């Protein structure tokens, strides 16, 4: 039984990847707006119904599952080095994501080019990113353990996510991120106990 379930999961993952790859290929060749969902299904050799079992809509075809993004944000807060502040840890996490893409990572380069080419995809990406607010708030509240009011923790989570969401189109995103995070850090430290490591 376990072997059968394992085979099903592998097949499901392979189908998911085939659809995503077909979508990226078609969107990169012809542009996001010029390609229909039915064409993607045909290119991946699946039915439209199967495509929608894996992806809720056309925009989602471009993006991998965002569970990993959320887990990484939460880990940036919980697993930061001792004495390292929450804002500093989140800044470093966001900076790492903005680093240069390796030359051999063709898929990532194509994805970023496609994202820049479509206002609809940029908007979807931003909305998708902001869905992590509740999980990030919870992580910050847990780390503060009652030493900072939960509404302040929620505000920090919101503004950190918004800060990254506002970087689209910036020619020097790391510099802009750093300037904005300095503002957040100053506001945050006004609300945290001295020498708390928060």
Image: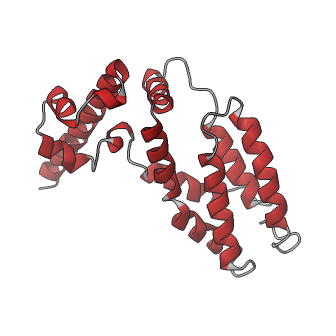
Counting from the top left corner in percent of width and height, residue 116 is at: 51, 30
Q: Is residue 47 above or below residue 158?
A: above
Query: Which residue is pictured at 33% across the width and 26% down the height?
Result: 27
Determine whether, in the image, residue 72 is placed left or right of residue 88. Answer: left
Nearest the eye: 5 or 67: 67
- Which image quarter is the C terminus in? bottom right
Determine whether, in the image, residue 80 is placed left or right of residue 11. Answer: right
Determine whether, in the image, residue 25 is placed left or right of residue 84. Answer: left
* Mark count: 0
Nearest the eye: 160 or 122: 122
Q: Is residue 74 above or below residue 146?
A: above
Quadrant of the rendered image containing residue 107: top left
Q: How is the image coloured?
A: secondary structure
Is there any visible trace of residue 143 in the rendered image? no
Determine whether, in the image, residue 102 is placed left or right of residue 187. Answer: left
Counting from the top left corner in percent of width and height, residue 123 is at: 48, 45
Query: Which residue is pictured at 76% across the width and 53% down the height?
Result: 88
Counting from the top left corner in percent of width and height, residue 83 is at: 80, 60
Query: Which residue is pictured at 52% across the width and 56% down the height?
Result: 130
- Which image quarter is the N terminus in? bottom left
Is there any visible trace of residue 113 in the rendered image? yes
Counting from the top left corner in percent of width and height, residue 34 is at: 30, 27
Nearest the eye: 118 or 86: 118
Query: Which residue is pictured at 64% across the width and 41% down the height?
Result: 167
């Amino acid at each position: 039984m376990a072997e059968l379930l394992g085979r099903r999961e592998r097949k499901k993952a392979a189908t998911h990847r085939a659809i995503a790859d077909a979508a990226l290929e078609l969107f990169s060749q012809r542009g996001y707006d010029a390609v229909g969902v039915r064409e993607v299904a045909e290119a991946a050799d699946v039915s439209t119904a199967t495509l929608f079992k894996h992806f809720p809509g056309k925009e989602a075809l471009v993006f991998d599952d965002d569970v990993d993004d959320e887990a990484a944000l939460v880990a940036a807060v919980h697993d930061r080095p001792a004495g390292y502040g929450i804002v500093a840890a989140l800044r470093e996490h966001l900076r790492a994501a903005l680093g240069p893409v390796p030359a051999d990572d063709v898929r990532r380069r194509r994805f970023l080019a496609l994202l820049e080419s479509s206002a609809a995809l940029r908007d979807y990406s931003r909305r998708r990113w902001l869905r992590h607010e509740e999980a990030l708030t919870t992580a910050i509240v847990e780390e503060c353990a009652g030493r900072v009011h939960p509404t302040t923790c929620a505000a920090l989570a919101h503004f950190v996510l918004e800060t990254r969401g506002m970087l689209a189109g910036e020619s020097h995103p790391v510099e802009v991120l750093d300037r904005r995070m300095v503002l957040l850090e100053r506001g945050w430290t006004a609300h945290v106990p001295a020498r708390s490591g928060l």
